[in-house]
Image: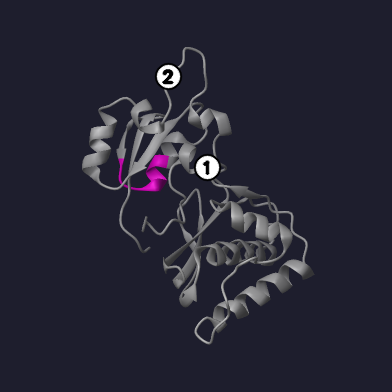
Amino acid sequence: MSGKSKYYVVWKGVERGVYDNWADCLRRTQGFEGAQYKSFATREEAERAFSESPYEHLGRTPRRAGPTVSKVVGPCIPQSLAVDAACSGNPGDMEYRGVHVASGRQLFHIGPMAQGTNNIGEFLAIVHALALCAKTGQTQLPIYSDSRNAIAWVKQRHCRTKLAPTAANAPIFDLIRRAEAWLHAHTYTNPVLKWETEAWGENPADFGRK
């Protein structure tokens, strides 16, 4: 798994605390009504935040009879697949991957590939996940992405990038053509859903380069 570590504060959940991986955080918050948690870049920031009110970090003020951030959107679905992309520059070296949410197990990883964009990577990641689910018979498995653009492009069956094709990024455009052809040739029943970072913490497939 590439990328730097994140630290997760759970203010309200099955068990409160500071955790150094997403899987531990998820086990203490999934299905817990009104769970409050957030990721931080360093342990020092996380420990300090844990000693403070969650509302200083979640961007909300407490209300006497109102839902927390997580209750507004509900919990994520643990038996699901999350995808994400990373790009060093715009355009730059692009890669993407898919991760099983409940276990944190990486299911696929493509790249880096030269002269791509993050939106292209997000689009390709969703289609890759759909094709994988179709191949393995997991046709109802939810697929999460934190890119609204990529989700919309998949629904339109077209990668609406403004990036111009070049010799350097020809392999990426070949993947785009194959992904669009797959979408036009297949129907899918997997729900493609928005990953709600503010409520659930970092996307499990995040590369940790923000």
Quadrant of image for the N terminus: bottom left
Residue at the extreme left of the image, as rendered = 44
Q: Position of residue 88 (x, y in %)?
A: 40, 68
* Residue at the disc numbered 2: 62
* Kind of residue indicated by mark 1: Glu
Q: Is residue 86 above or below residue 54?
A: below
Q: Position of residue 34 (x, y in %)?
A: 49, 26
Do labels 1 and 2 touch, CB within 8 Å? no
* Residue at the disc numbered 1: 196
Residue 206 in magenta stretch: no
Q: CA distance from mark 1 to mark 2?
A: 20 Å
Range drawn in magenta: 19-25
Q: Position of residue 25 (x, y in %)?
A: 39, 41
Quadrant of image for the C terminus: bottom left
Give whichever of discs 1 and 2 has the lower sequence position.
2
Q: Is residue 142 above or below residue 167?
A: above
Give the numbered dot on residue 164.
none
185 sits left or right of 54 in the view: right
* Kind of residue indicated by mark 2: Pro
Q: Secondary structure at mark 1?
A: loop
- Residue at position x 39%, y 47% in the image: 22
Which class describes the residues within 10 Å of circle 2: few (<14), some (14-19), or many (20+)? Answer: few
Residue at the extreme bottom of the image, as rendered = 167
- Residue at position x 45%, y 30% in the image: 35
- Residue at position x 48%, y 43% in the image: 197
Query: Which coloring applies here?
Result: one colour
17 sits left or right of 69 in the view: left
Q: Is residue 84 above or below residue 197?
A: below
Q: Secondary structure at mark 2?
A: loop
- Residue at position x 67%, y 76% in the image: 178
